[in-house]
Image (spheres, helix red, strand yellow):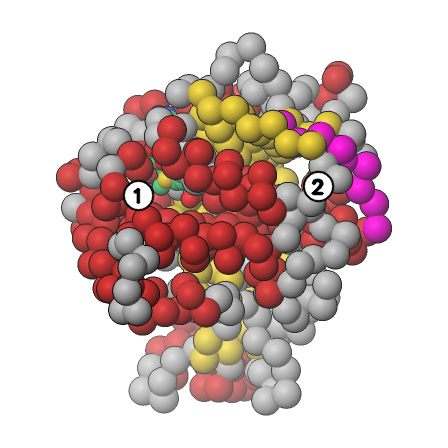
């Protein structure tokens, strides 16, 4: 597959599933479920009805979460709204979180097994399972390996209806050379082990006091390393501050209670010390990532009606290895902001004083250079392998690419000044 093409525009030869057919099935079923296809206006009436339902669910998710009915996925209107506004974007969020070089280094092992056992907790219509299978298929195509023959998914999900539609689509679009078995359970089975455990956008539907217990349960569902298997757990949450901060607090709690040998973070963190963006630090920023998304045509039609923009998708996440000995290559740092000009002309003097007194590192930089950077520098925030949060400043030339949130950074990158962030 050409890497500049979005996954949904190609049948992905050599991969696991046919994304073009998935999009077609999703569009056809959504239109059919929303209004009977009897007259020539049915498409535009369906779009209108889906967008009305989407606006309602969007509002509850974003501003009135306490009003969210625990069985919203089984209720007709919010089920259709979820499929309209969240199914495809959440496939992309999960796919993107699993496509970083560090995630790929762990996923690659999974391509060596004949049977892949997946637990999708809070699966809804299996969005995260689709995202995982697409990321794995892309990796299989790049690496030219794939020994998988059987895929077994357990969807631990309250809503039978949500799982059934995801199951119907997956059974239709999965390449026929793979055998697939999908079972729904209402809770995580305690007597089974998995290669892959997925929990996307579900932690925020569970009371905070149960987060750590849920994490332990999911972690204990992974094959341990003495089985000879390399297993992974993905927890993905929305990108907003409230959700990211809870995930970070859970990360810190797990590291301090379980210890870093039992809680091996593959991504995004380049260290296992306390998170410098944790709620304890009382900062206004938080740890989140994003991907640019080339929105498929039917999603774009739905978005125009509901006035939702999916061209950039935010999320926060943790990818954890089931193996105590997993040693993925950690980058020197990871960007936790996009690169921005340091500020306006007026603040230049104040900034220059601030840069001089907060400068870190052993590089000798002249006062004149610091003043220059305070005037026209570009700054990126970095979460470093030392556990520190640093501001990294450079004089950016017009032809140089910007540092973007989520990018892994090598120490040799061309920053001229580092300052400690507080
Ligand atoms: C926001 S949806 C996420 C669906 C899918 N993972 C995604 O990312 O698109 C959350 C799902 O979790 C399910 N859920 C919430 N709490 C649950 C629990 N304790 N046990 C099983 N399912 C649960 C809900 O029914 C809902 O379908």
- Within 10 Å of disc 1 (Cα), the crowding (few <14, some 14-19, many 20+) is many
Image quarter of residue 194: top right
Q: Is any atom of residue 289 visible in this view?
A: no
The N terminus lies in which quarter of the figure? Answer: bottom right
Identify the element where label 2 is drawn: loop
Residue projecting furthest to the right: 144
Identify the element where label 1 is drawn: helix
Q: In the rendered view, does 385 fall on the left or right side of 375?
A: right
- Residue at image location 59% in from the left, 89% down from the top: 398
Name the residue beneath numbered marker 1.
79
Q: Residue 122, position in %: x, y?
A: 41, 32
The answer to which of 106 and 1 lies nearer the viewer is 1
The C terminus lies in which quarter of the figure? Answer: bottom left
- Residue at image location 50% in from the left, 72% down from the top: 339
* Residue bounds of the magenta highlight: 144-152
Q: In the rendered view, does 59 fall on the left or right side of 317?
A: left
- Residue at image location 51% in from the left, 32% down from the top: 120
Q: In the rendered view, does 189 fall on the left or right side of 124?
A: right
The answer to which of 339 and 115 lies nearer the viewer is 115
Q: Residue 267, position in %: x, y?
A: 59, 44
């Amino acid at each position: 597959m050409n890497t500049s093409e979005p996954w949904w525009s190609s049948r992905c030869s050599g991969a696991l599933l046919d994304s073009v057919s998935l999009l077609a099935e999703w569009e056809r079923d959504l239109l059919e479920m929303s209004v009977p296809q009897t007259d020539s206006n049915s498409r535009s009436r369906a779009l209108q009805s889906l967008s009305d339902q989407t606006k309602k669910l969007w509002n509850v998710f974003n501003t009135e979460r306490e009003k969210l009915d625990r069985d919203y996925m089984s209720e007709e209107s919010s089920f259709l709204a979820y499929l309209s506004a969240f199914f495809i974007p959440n496939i992309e969020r999960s796919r993107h979180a699993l496509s970083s070089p560090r995630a790929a280094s762990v996923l690659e092992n999974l391509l060596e097994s004949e049977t892949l056992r997946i637990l999708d907790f809070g699966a809804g219509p299996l969005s995260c399972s689709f995202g995982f299978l697409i990321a794995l298929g892309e990796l299989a195509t790049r690496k030219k390996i794939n020994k998988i023959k059987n895929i077994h998914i357990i969807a631990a999900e309250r809503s039978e209806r949500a799982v059934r539609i995801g199951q119907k689509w997956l059974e239709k679009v999965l390449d026929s050379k793979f055998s697939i078995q999908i079972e729904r359970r209402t809770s995580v089975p305690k007597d089974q082990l998995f290669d892959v455990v997925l929990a996307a956008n579900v932690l925020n539907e569970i009371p905070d006091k149960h987060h750590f217990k849920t994490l332990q349960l999911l972690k204990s569902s992974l094959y341990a390393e003495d089985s000879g298997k390399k297993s992974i757990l993905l927890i993905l949450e929305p990108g907003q501050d409230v959700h990211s901060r809870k995930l970070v607090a859970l990360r810190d709690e797990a590291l301090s209670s379980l210890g870093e040998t039992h809680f091996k973070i593959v991504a995004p963190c380049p260290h296992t010390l306390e998170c410098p963006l944790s709620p304890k630090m009382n900062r206004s920023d938080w740890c989140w990532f994003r991907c640019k998304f080339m929105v498929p045509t039917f999603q774009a039609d739905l978005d125009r009606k509901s006035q939702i923009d999916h061209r950039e998708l935010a999320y926060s996440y943790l990818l954890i290895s089931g193996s105590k000995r997993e040693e993925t290559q950690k980058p020197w740092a990871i960007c936790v902001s996009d690169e921005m000009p340091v500020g306006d002309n007026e603040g230049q003097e104040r900034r220059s004083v601030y840069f001089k007194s907060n400068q870190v590192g052993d590089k000798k930089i002249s006062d004149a250079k610091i003043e220059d950077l305070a005037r026209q520098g570009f700054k990126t925030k970095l979460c470093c392998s030392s556990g520190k949060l640093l501001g990294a400043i450079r004089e950016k030339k017009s032809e140089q690419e910007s540092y973007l949130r989520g990018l892994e950074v090598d120490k040799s990158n061309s920053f001229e000044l580092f300052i400690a962030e507080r």
